[in-house]
Image: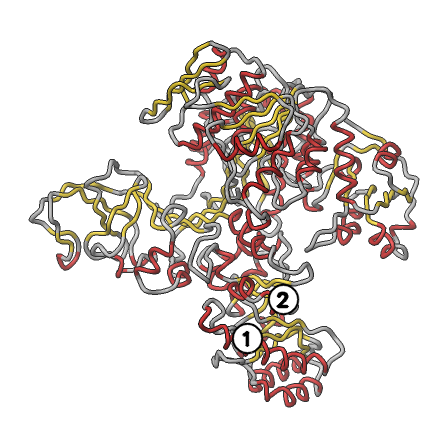
């Protein structure tokens, strides 16, 4: 739906500056996601970490002419060139986020259709996507893209509703008290689904009950609320909330419930579920066996029954439910290609997100942008209209080649005015690639298709097979860790994120790129070569060099890498080289030794240091910092407080000597949590970013998962041994599996001979014999497995701390030991 700029101005109560005519179709809060500038209204949101007004000039240069800004931001712009530009509209409000939410609320009021609102701690997105699979054949459905469930994501999701919408499905997520009221006003669900209540975001709530009651506010005006009636905690909260809605509290134990689950029978690869609803007995088969999927399917069942989907259609469609892929996988392809695999679903919303991901990843790669796209199914739109919108999205992201698969997209080939090729089905496309008729080379390729097109086989053909051992890096989990620590900081506190040692083994570029997109203030690496590699790969964020080498001064100057300086010898050499190069005010970071006794100026060096810095203009102190010795351990707290006092005095002495702001920082990951009063101007986040608490070695959000595959399984008699030096002694006839991972990949030899284990199909399999350079052996005698099965070395189910504890070392060492020959695969939740 389109709105005039006049109606939007009135709706959000804005003061309009500018008189340019405009029609708005698109709302934008992230400048990187711009698609259609002429019809876009940009909301310059102010967050703890960023100010959207900073991007107005850039967006104007890219064609945007309509902006919602705060009074404060507008005052800062009053002397700027844009304010005088007659073709621009500024809608000035007190709070742009509230204006965005108000506009979405008014838009929602235009529709009298069923709206499903889903909240809970886990399963929201899966329930949403499965409901779409179950209900979309008869209805045109609008739903939240991926996990757009926040104070910003919900209004953007609701804005997608249009005249064709017959049903809407929206997620609502909260992280602190008071947030759900706004989301309820925007979504106004008629059907509520509560998935479950877990520990996510618990740190901001007094109790689990407080969090549950906050979530239930979403359902205050619903016609019906769906939840697990067997969960006593949820049932108590629902009762206490005094909702007026009808309840479908399904149960596996109470036959009096409106939806009674009479039997759940797990098979090898599916689950048979029998149920009674309105005195009618029925059964369906679910193609999953895990408990979470079963519970999610029962929430979907209740919603479908309430919407009067016939039981036979429920049975038919439940059997065809597809797994919900919550990630965009980045893989290395053949012929210098980079693959972005999103071959799980295909709709305009997810296509827009995936194209945006492709565009941002392509900027520094120098690769041709290619889209492989299947028919987009079950949208409710006619084919020409649908692919006209696809064409707009493709053009907005500067795609250079499109490869279409399917009859519908092929019929619209003429609409794509770029390099193109079209195929009736996936097999035909694969054959064209294998015969050399279609050449993919030096391209970044988004593979985006509906599940029925089987694009997994296409990815298999295009992917470069280097090694069967893979380190999976969950960038979404890393950002969750980043936000976990950010939540403990004052809004003005800056953050340095450590990406040295190839981002603790995770791979520096993808990690740095993601952190840059989330507006961290500094990245830190060990040596200049690490920094220059990031610059060459397109990283523009400020980079701090923690261990600068005197032979690398020119590299630091050329690539704008900011070194720490810890001695007069290093400082004098750096000043001399900078003066020789004609460089002035090159930023440096002064390191103080307050007790580590590794590197750094002593506090008593401060007068001499100040005198030396004032006597030149080649370099300028950007920050001053020190290292905690034992901030993770209570027994060292007295020493840590002594360090803080020493640092505060010395750093203040430095600051008072200069008029410009010098950032002060001493907190590491442990310090952020245990010494919040020592945040100063900035903190440094290291191991905590990668999901490991330095305080108790617990896992926050696991980032890295190392897994491999079983190469071969053989039966070995009790009398035989396994591996080099006959160290693998058996005590029974055994099944021994060989894995393609060894100490050259980073699997420490000291884990062998039964000292540690890996996981095969979720079960412990101890290492047998000596670990070899490229291969190791494990005992799978009691495990149902076969050649080709996946093995987890560490990850989501086997914490890396289990390995580090066995080795009597720290998780850092295990992570950074993973060899560069192990392929990294990146994905985002």
Question: Residue 290, percent across and down?
Answer: 39, 32
**Residue 559 in view, yes or no:** no
Q: Is residue 722 found left or right of 34 in the rendered image?
A: left
Name which quarter of the figure residue 162 lies in: top right
Question: How crowded is the residue under tag 1: few (<14 C-alpha within 10 Å), some, or many (20+)?
Answer: some
134 to the left or right of 293:
right
Image: 639 above or below 380: below
User: Closer to the camera, 202 or 82?
Assistant: 202
Q: Residue at x 49, y 12 (%)?
A: 311
Q: Nearer the viewer, residue 522 or 291?
A: 291
| Rendered residue at 75%/33% (across/down) | 104
Tell me the number on the disc at residue 641. 1
Q: Do the residues under discs 2 and 1 have CB atoms within 8 angstroms?
A: no
Residue 68 locus on image (x, y percent): 81, 44
Locate residue 613 relative to residue 801 in the image: left or right: right
Q: What numbered label is drawn on residue 465? A: none
Q: Give the answer, above or below, for where 108 lies relative to 548.
A: above
Q: Is residue 79 above or below residue 317?
A: below
Q: In the displayed structure, does residue 606 sit left or right of residue 686?
A: right
Residue linked to disc 2: 682
Residue 601 place in picture, x, y as percent:
56, 83
Q: Which of the 4 image quarters holds residue 160? A: top right
SS label for mark 2? strand
Which corner quadrant of the image does residue 567 belong to? bottom right
Q: Secondary structure at mark 1?
A: helix
Query: Whole-Å distance between the Cαs marked 2 and 1?
Result: 18 Å
- In-front residue for pair 531/815: 815
Q: Name the residue: 90% across, 57% down.
A: 79
Binning the other alpha carbons within 10 Å of mark 2 as few (below 14), some (14 to 19) or many (20 upward) gives many
Q: Is residue 487 something one can see in this rendering?
A: yes
């Amino acid at each position: 739906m389109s709105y005039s700029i006049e109606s939007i101005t009135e709706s959000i109560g804005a003061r309009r500056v500018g008189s340019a005519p405009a029609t708005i179709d698109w709302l934008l809060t992230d400048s990187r996601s711009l698609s259609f500038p002429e019809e876009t209204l940009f909301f310059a949101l102010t967050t703890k970490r960023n100010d959207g007004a900073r991007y107005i000039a850039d967006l104007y240069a890219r064609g945007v002419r309509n902006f919602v800004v705060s009074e404060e931001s507008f005052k800062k712009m009053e002397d700027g060139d844009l304010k005088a530009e007659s073709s621009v509209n500024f809608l000035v409000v007190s709070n742009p986020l509230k204006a965005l939410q108000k506009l979405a609320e008014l838009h929602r009021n235009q529709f009298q259709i069923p709206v499903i609102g889903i909240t809970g701690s886990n399963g929201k997105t899966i329930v949403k996507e499965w409901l779409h699979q179950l209900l979309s054949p008869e209805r045109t459905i609008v739903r939240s893209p991926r996990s757009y469930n926040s104070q910003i994501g919900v209004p953007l999701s609701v804005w997608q509703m249009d005249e064709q919408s017959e049903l809407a499905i929206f997620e609502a997520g909260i992280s602190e008290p008071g947030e759900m009221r706004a989301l309820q006003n925007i979504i106004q669900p008629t059907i509520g689904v509560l998935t479950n209540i877990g520990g996510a975001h618990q740190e901001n709530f007094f109790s689990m009950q407080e969090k549950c009651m906050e979530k239930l506010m979403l359902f205050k005006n619903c016609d019906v609320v769906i939840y697990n009636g067997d969960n006593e905690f949820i049932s108590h909260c629902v009762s206490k909330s005094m909702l007026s809605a009808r309840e479908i509290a399904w149960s596996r134990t109470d036959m009096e419930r409106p939806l009674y689950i009479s039997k759940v029978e797990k098979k090898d690869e599916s689950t048979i579920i029998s149920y009674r609803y309105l005195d009618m007995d029925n059964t369906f088969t679910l193609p999953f066996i895990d408990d979470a999927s079963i519970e999610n399917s029962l929430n979907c069942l209740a919603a479908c029954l309430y919407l009067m989907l016939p039981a036979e259609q429920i049975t038919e469609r439940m059997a065809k439910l597809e797994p919900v892929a919550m990630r965009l996988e980045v893989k290395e392809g053949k012929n210098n290609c980079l693959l972005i695999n999103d071959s799980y679903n295909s709709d305009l919303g997810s296509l827009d997100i995936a194209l945006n991901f492709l565009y941002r990843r392509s900027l520094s790669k120098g690769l041709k942008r290619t889209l492989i796209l299947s028919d987009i199914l079950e949208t409710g739109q006619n084919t020409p209209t649908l692919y006209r919108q696809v064409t707009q999205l493709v053009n907005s992201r500067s795609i250079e080649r499109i490869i279409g698969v399917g009859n519908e997209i092929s019929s619209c080939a003429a609409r794509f005015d770029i390099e193109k090729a079209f195929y009736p089905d996936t097999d035909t496309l694969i054959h064209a690639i294998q015969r050399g008729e279609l050449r993919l080379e030096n391209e970044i390729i988004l593979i985006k298709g509906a599940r029925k097109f089987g694009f997994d086989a296409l990815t298999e053909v295009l992917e470069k097979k280097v090694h069967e051992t893979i380190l999976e890096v969950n960038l979404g989990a890393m950002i969750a860790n980043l936000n976990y620590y950010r939540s403990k900081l004052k809004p003005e506190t800056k953050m340095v994120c450590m990406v040295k040692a190839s981002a603790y083994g995770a791979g520096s570029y993808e990690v740095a790129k993601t952190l840059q997109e989330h507006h961290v203030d500094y990245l830190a690496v060990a040596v200049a070569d690490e920094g220059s590699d990031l610059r060459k790969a397109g990283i523009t964020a400020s980079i701090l060099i923690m261990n600068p080498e005197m032979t690398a001064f020119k590299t630091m100057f050329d690539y704008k890498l900011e070194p720490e300086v810890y001695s007069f010898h290093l400082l004098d050499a750096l000043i001399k080289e900078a003066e020789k190069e004609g460089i002035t005010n090159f930023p440096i970071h002064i390191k103080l030794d307050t007790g580590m006794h590794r590197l750094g100026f002593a506090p008593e060096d401060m007068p001499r240091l100040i005198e030396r810095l004032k006597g030149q203009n080649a370099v300028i102190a950007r920050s001053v910092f020190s290292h905690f010795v034992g901030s993770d351990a209570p027994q060292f707290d007295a020493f840590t407080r002594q360090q803080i006092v020493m640092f505060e005095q010395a750093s203040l002495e430095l600051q008072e000597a200069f008029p410009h702001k010098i950032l002060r920082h001493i907190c590491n990951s442990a310090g952020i949590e245990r010494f919040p009063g020592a945040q100063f101007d900035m903190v440094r986040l290291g191991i905590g970013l990668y999901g490991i608490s330095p305080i108790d070695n617990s896992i926050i959000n696991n980032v890295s998962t190392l897994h491999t595959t079983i190469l071969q399984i053989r039966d070995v008699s009790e009398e035989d041994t396994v591996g080099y030096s006959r160290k693998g002694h058996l005590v029974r006839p055994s099944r021994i599996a060989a894995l393609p991972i060894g100490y050259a990949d980073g699997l420490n030899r000291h884990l062998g001979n039964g000292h540690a284990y890996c996981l095969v199909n979720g079960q412990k399999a101890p290492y047998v014999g000596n670990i070899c350079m490229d291969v190791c052996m494990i005992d799978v005698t009691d495990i149902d497995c076969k050649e080709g099965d996946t093995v987890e070395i560490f990850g989501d189910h086997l914490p890396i701390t289990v390995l580090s504890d066995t080795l009597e070392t720290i998780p850092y060492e295990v992570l950074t030991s993973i060899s560069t020959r192990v392929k990294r695969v990146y994905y985002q939740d």
